[in-house]
Image (cartoon, rainbow, N blue to C red):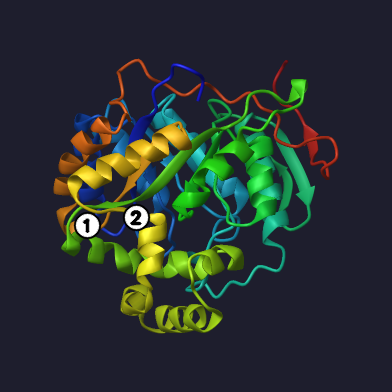
Amino acid sequence: MSAGDAPGWGVWFEPVLPVPDLAALARIAEDAGAGYVWVADEGTDRDVHVVMAAIALATQRVRIGAAITNPFSRHPVATAAAFASLEELAPGRIISGFGVGGARVLGPLGLTPPRPYSSLRETVAAVDRLLAGEAVTHHGEVNLESARIPWSPRRLPIAMAGRGPRVEALAIETADWVLLAGKPLVRLPELVGKVRAPRPVDAGDPPRIAWSTYVAWTPAMIEQVRPHMTYATVDMPPETRALLGIDDATTDLIREVGLRDGFAAAANLVPDSVIEGTAIVGDRGSVVEQLAAVRRKAAPDLFVLAMNDYAVADRLIVEAAPLIHSAGFVPATASAHDSPRSRQFLPARAPALAVASTRQP
């Protein structure tokens, strides 16, 4: 975030509600001042691209991003075609989003990818070039043979989220947005500083930073956060769990119960330290103070409000908006927009994709 730019805010949805309900929530968020709507891809929930399409039709201004899709549940060509179709539907408002996926999406598919980082890198490079209208042949963790989407409107901004250092480094190097979710609050300034570290002259501007977490200002709301922390706890790097006081036995038990009975069933196993260390909780005044402190110390470009209880998500958005604004995250304006993607994805040292351009320079 450049000096003088005030950070905005958005919302993050797990697609656990019927698609029309999610579209209606997006309208409420847009009316409340949100500039972004991010939609998770959890495999057994509503399809991320269908939900994004419904939101695009139901809204006029918000930018709509995938947060995040993975390299394994869809082929890169199908993913690229879906994002290109969304860009046709809502020109200038679509953000592609990628990560390696977690236990909640890959577990039910029975997938344990052997090289998730390589698969991610190859997938995002292929999608980026397909959206640019190039023909792509590649043989590796993912395979494409003269694949081409010549009708793609443009390259899309790329958002990326990751838990490990390699994915974080890839996001800093290549993405337009870095999504920080489930991160310890005490580490946010350090993580943001890493993203914004000085770069080589030819590397371009650093990516923008979207920080997402849960906000709760009553004891009941705080307890509604706990089920969401089950899969987040399982997917945390070991050093993050150690920082939050979670031992391996607790992690293994949450994973076992979550995969067998659903992650909500493991909620009572999540220690308070996880909620207090990663979410913004307290009374209303404390919530504003904590949000404002993160804005001052870490200065993310965007705060993303995650939903606690989807039964009352409309009320959460409406009641949270003034608290978010009071903390210095400003309402979106009609003129706000994301710049078209211009960053090169694959640096020279990475394995090259065989590409035959179909567009004139």
Q: Which residue is mark 1?
A: 310
Q: Quadrant of residue 326?
A: top left
Instruction: Out of 196 and 149, give the one closest to the viewer.
Output: 196
Tag 2's secondary structure?
loop
Q: Which amino acid type is shown beneath numbered disc 2?
A: Glu
Residue 36 visible at all: no
- 94 left or right, relative to 101: left
Q: Earlier in the sequence, mark 2 or mark 1?
A: 2
Q: Quadrant of residue 150?
A: top right
Q: Are marks 2 and 1 in contact (CB under 8 Å)?
A: yes
Residue 59 visible at all: yes
Name above or below for residue 311 compared with residue 252: above
Q: Which amino acid type is shown beneath numbered disc 1?
A: Tyr
Q: Where does the image place residue 267, in percent across and percent down from the top left? A: 33, 75
Q: Which residue is mark 2?
A: 14
Identify the residue at horizontal 60%, vertical 55% (top origin).
71
Q: Quadrant of the C terminus?
A: top right
Identify the residue at horizontal 67%, vertical 53% (top origin).
165
- 38 left or right, relative to 219: right
Instruction: Out of 12 and 7, give the one closest to the viewer.
Output: 7
Name above or below for residue 125 compared with residue 91: below
Q: Residues within 10 Å of mark 1 (few under 14, many from 20)?
A: some
- 142 left or right, relative to 86: right
Tag 1's secondary structure?
helix
Name above or below for residue 93 compared with residue 69: above
Q: Quadrant of residue 141?
A: bottom right
Label ID, residue 235: none
Identify the residue at horizontal 32%, vertical 69% (top origin).
227
Q: Where does the image place residue 69, in percent across and percent down from the top left? A: 51, 52
